[in-house]
Image (cartoon, grey):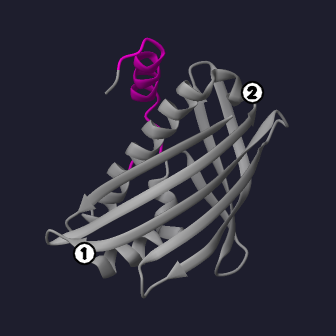
Amino acid sequence: MNATISKTFHVLHPLADVWENITNPEKIVVCVPGAALTEMLDADNFKGDVELKFGPVKAKYGGVISFLERNADTHTMKMKGAGTDVKGKGGADMILDASMSEKDGGTEVSVTMDVTVQGMLAQFGSRLVTDATTHVFDQFVSNFKNQLDGMEVKGALSAGAMMGSMIKGMFGGNK
């Protein structure tokens, strides 16, 4: 099951600050709901865990995230992630492309994320997985903005709000 998410968001912070945060694994991981950095393998590769809960179903993935590209001159980056369910019931792969540019006194960030899910979570179907992935990404953006603003970052996934968006998706309602 595949899902592609494309988002653009704006933050009122200089491009250099946004670039420094978004390309630093130790800073950015705390913005990803349910994620934890477990080991830095080298400057471009690290291990981590992500735990997600979809109603009564809980999935925890362990895997490796790699920077395939980090170009400070063009402010573009590409990442690849691959993880397996710790219970052996599937896996997930992700390719993320991001670009940043100065805009309206701050920084515009454009991200495209291609996610492939196998196993138990794939049984939810592409629409529900896309809705859930979108919700996780929206929470990431909120956390990232809070981090840049020096505010508290909520590392736990907001499951209630995610379930609400998934239920809306099931019945054809859009946010």
Q: Quadrant of the N terminus?
A: top right
Residue 72 located left or right of residue 148: right
Q: Quadrant of residue 55?
A: top right
- Residue 152: % across, % down: 32, 54
- Residue 149: % across, % down: 24, 63
> In this view, which residue lies farthest toward the top?
171
- Kind of element beneath mark 2: helix
Q: Quadrant of residue 13?
A: bottom left
Q: Which residue is mark 2?
A: 120
For label 2, count other residues whose C-alpha is less than 10 Å away and answer few (under 14), some (14-19) or many (20+): some
Is 169 included in the stretch rendered in magenta? yes
Name the residue located 24 percent from the left edge and 77 percent from the top edge.
14
Q: Is residue 72 visible?
A: yes
Q: Is residue 61 above or below residue 11?
A: above
Name the residue located 29 percent from the left edge and 77 percent from the top edge.
15
Q: Which residue is mark 1?
A: 102
Q: Which amino acid is tagged 2?
A: Met
Q: Quadrant of the C terminus?
A: top left
> Magenta part of the protein: which range?
153-173
Q: Which amino acid is tagged 1?
A: Glu
